Image (cartoon, grey):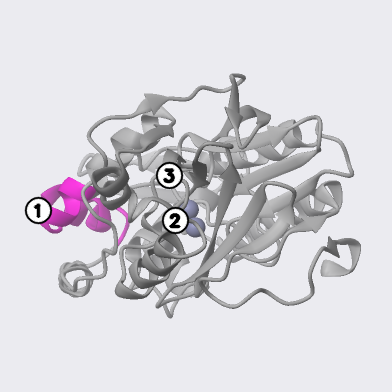
Amino acid sequence: MSDDLNFTVQRPPAYGELTDVLPGLFWVRLPMPAAPNHVNCWLLDDGPGWTMVDCGLNTDDSFEMWDKLWRGLLRSRPLQNLALTHAHADHSGLAAYFVKETKCAVRMPLTEWLNAWKTWHEREDGPDEQFVSFLKRNGASDDDAARIVEAQRQPTFLGSRPPREFTRIRDGEVISMGRREWKVFTAGGHSVEHALFFCESDRILIAGDQILSHMTPSVIAPPAQPGANPMQDYLDSLTRLEGLPPDTLVLPSHGLPFQGLHARLAQLREHHLSRLEDVASIVNGRTNAFLIAQEIFPRVLYANPRQAFGEALAHLNMLASSGRLTRDVGGDGAIAFAPA
Ligand SMILES: [Zn+2]
Ligand SMILES: [Zn+2]
């Protein structure tokens, strides 16, 4: 799969090590307790201080690695800016800690900031009635819904309270980070307003989770929008990114830096289109997201229902919007799909 990609390094650096990528741009890889087991953060040299892009999960391991770096190699100049690609906890989990300790300014898209707060409140409150109703309307029995809710009570959230103050970044805006100018792209599909940063003069793309080197980013219809079509948003973002130069160096949040942007965009598109065909081929009669999730994500259905239901719905909604399936909502709210 990766033959068309040219990796700048064959092996990742050790966790918590400061690694040169380009002049003034450094890579820090942090461990994660679950797949994909690591996240990449980027440090950009501003001269008088540093800009950091993404900051990792709120775990003891990440905390200790950052603490060592900021007391050691990075100690002579302060963290001034923290840019967040999106709200997911592996990217923003330690943001509030850094704001408190360093008074750094936070830049992120508005919807991502709102989403971080929504996630925080949901975790504080635990699974609510709307979530149970979402599961049942999408085909879970009372027992299945109860099992899923029970599994969700386990403390898996590794974020912290989001920063209270931030500067909004918008699609098309040009911002300065690490003595380079970066054009902001925002894209849907993986997260609602995920930011990518493109430096035109040096052809570098800080891609967040929108483009990964070895994995396919998850595309999820969230419980709050069971009828959303994030797959279309994701595929549209690939089309937009095809407008970037082919020799762009891509810095993904999971995996390794690589060149071969256009090949990777084609692979990601191909993956989703063939997955859509797979889903279409298993819809032989009237069905729902629970049955489809059971078929394609049996292992994560209970442990990660947001992913299992969300991905199943993302595929089903895309197939419905392109006319391959019908989608109907019964009087009781039940959502069903069938071949068109
Ligand atoms: Zn993400
Ligand atoms: Zn991520």
Disc assigned to residue 75: 2
Which label is found at residue 125? 1
Q: Quadrant of residue 29?
A: bottom right
Going by the image, does 191 lie left or right of 59? right
| Among the two numbered marks 2 and 1 on one chain, the one whose residue lies closer to the N terminus | 2
Seen in the picture, residue 236 relative to 261 is either above or below; the reply is above
Is residue 322 among what the camera can see?
no
Q: Residues within 10 Å of mark 1 (few under 14, many from 20)?
A: few
Magenta: main secondary structure equals helix
**What is the CA distance from the residue labelled 2 to the residue labelled 1?**
38 Å
Q: Nearer the viewer, residue 62 or 306?
A: 62
Which residue is pictured at 12% across the width and 54% down the height? Answer: 124
Left of 319 or right of it: where is 224? Answer: left
Identified by mark 2, the residue type is: Arg
In the image, what residue type sits under mark 1? Asp
Residue 121: say if magenta.
Answer: yes
Q: Amino acid at mark 3?
A: Leu
Quick one: SS at disc 1?
helix
Give me the residue at 29% from left, 64% from top: 158
Residue that badge 3 annotates: 79
Judging depth in this view, the residue of 167 and 85 nearest the camera is 167
Query: Which region of the structure is painted magenta?
Result: 120-139
